Image (tube, helix red, strand yellow):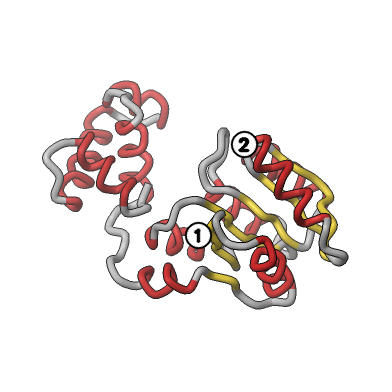
Amino acid sequence: MIRVVIAEDQAMVLGALAALLELEGDLNVVAQARDGAEALTLVRRERPDVLLTDIEMPKMTGLELAAETTRTVPGTRVVILTTFARSGYLRRALDAGASGYLLKDAPASELAAALRRVQAGGRAVDPELAAEAWGEPDPLSERERVCLRLAGQGQTSPEIAAELGLSVGTVRNYLSEAIGKLGAGNRVEAARLARERGWL
């Protein structure tokens, strides 16, 4: 049996995924989580063969969860299941240690086959995205990305500085660098561009 933990913040999607996978004779959903932090706790407790996770979730994103799972529970393979058909997200997912990256509109049979392939040591990546992923590289540093994400959520430089434990000047420098790298006119436009390309 392939033991699976699912992380998905939408209750209906979470229930449907679990029900679909349980129809497969060799897949056993051992736990379900509604946010990234809960998922990490469950993965550390259950030590499943595969973690199936969304990207956008409260408390910890799927990409952060993938990185932490790979670091702390190396026996668990990670598959990202998302609506985001963006090559930037795929690159970041693979960099975080994910072994699979699939879109939610893929057939259920493809998902089950992907989980089996990943559990056996292979990779499962949407082929069209894989071709795109090696085009435009992500120009942002991790600090620039975090500052830009918070700015895109409407936080001011002083608020970002307080949250991250940085000086206001340092935050402004990170934002200025990100704006320049993206060729944007301001922080809002930079955040929008980065999000569209999957870099946030």
Amino acid type assigned to the residue bearing label 1 in the image:
Ala
Q: Quadrant of residue 80?
A: bottom right
Residue matched to label 1: 93
Judge from the rendering whether residue 108 lies leftward or rightward of residue 45; answer left or right: left
Q: Position of residue 163 (x, y in %)?
A: 42, 26
The N terminus - image quarter: bottom right
Using the image, tell me which numbered label, if any, was put on residue 10.
2
Residue at 62 percent across and 62 percent down: it is 107
Q: Quadrant of residue 15?
A: top right
Residue at 74 percent across and 76 percent down: it is 120
Amino acid type assigned to the residue bearing label 2 in the image:
Gln
Contact flag, marks 1 and 2 (Cβ < 8 Å) = no
Q: Is 153 rendered above or below residue 199?
A: above
Structural crowding at the residue carrying mark 2, measured as other residues with C-alpha within 10 Å and reported as few (<14), some (14–19) or many (≥20)? few
Quick one: SS at disc 2? loop
Residue at 39 percent across and 75 percent down: it is 131
Q: Earlier in the sequence, mark 1 or mark 2?
A: 2
Q: CA distance from mark 1 to mark 2?
A: 20 Å
Structural crowding at the residue carrying mark 1, measured as other residues with C-alpha within 10 Å and reported as few (<14), some (14–19) or many (≥20)? many
